Image: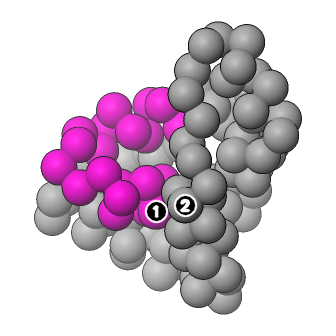
Amino acid sequence: MITFADDGKTINPIEPHEREWALFLIFVLSQFDGDDPEDWDSHIDWVRARFETPDAWLGSEGAHYRKGLDWRDPGREFVRRWQRFKAAHVFESPDEINRLLGIMLFDA
């Protein structure tokens, strides 16, 4: 999802259809501080290839998929935190989302 400019230190603008996934990446990075951001970006790319939205991944469709792989559920509290985060950032501009991603990736 994240592509870097030629300088390797700035993020190319996100596409409109990637907005919610970019917010989800920011949320996940804020929840798992200290984890490698590139690992999470790769994981979310993998999930995004299979699910239309983060809510689909965290909802019943994702639960069914995770059960088939014997993966644990993220838990209700995680989903509630995501919903609150998403609601709080519903009006963030693409530029602001990119700025937040840059902070999460380069200032971690």
Q: Position of residue 93 (x, y in %)?
A: 59, 83
Q: Residue at x 49, y 73 (%)?
A: 97
The residue at which mark 1 appears reads as 27
Camera-side residue of 91 and 14: 91
Camera-side residue of 107 and 77: 77
Kindly state the secondary structure of the residue where label 2 is placed: helix
Relative to 89, 38 lies left or right: left
Q: Work out how far the residue at label 1 is from the one at label 2, CA to CA, in angstroms.
A: 13 Å
Discs 1, 2 touching: Cβ within 8 Å: no
Give residue 91's quadrant in the image: bottom right
Mark 1 neighbour density, 10 Å: few (under 14) some (14–19) many (20 or more): some
Amino acid carrying label 1: it is Phe
The numbered dot on residue 77 is 2
Q: Residue at x 84, y 35 (%)?
A: 61
Colouring scheme, one of rainbow, by chain, secondary structure, one colour? one colour
Relative to 45, 19 lies left or right: right
**Residue range highlighted in magenta:** 22-44
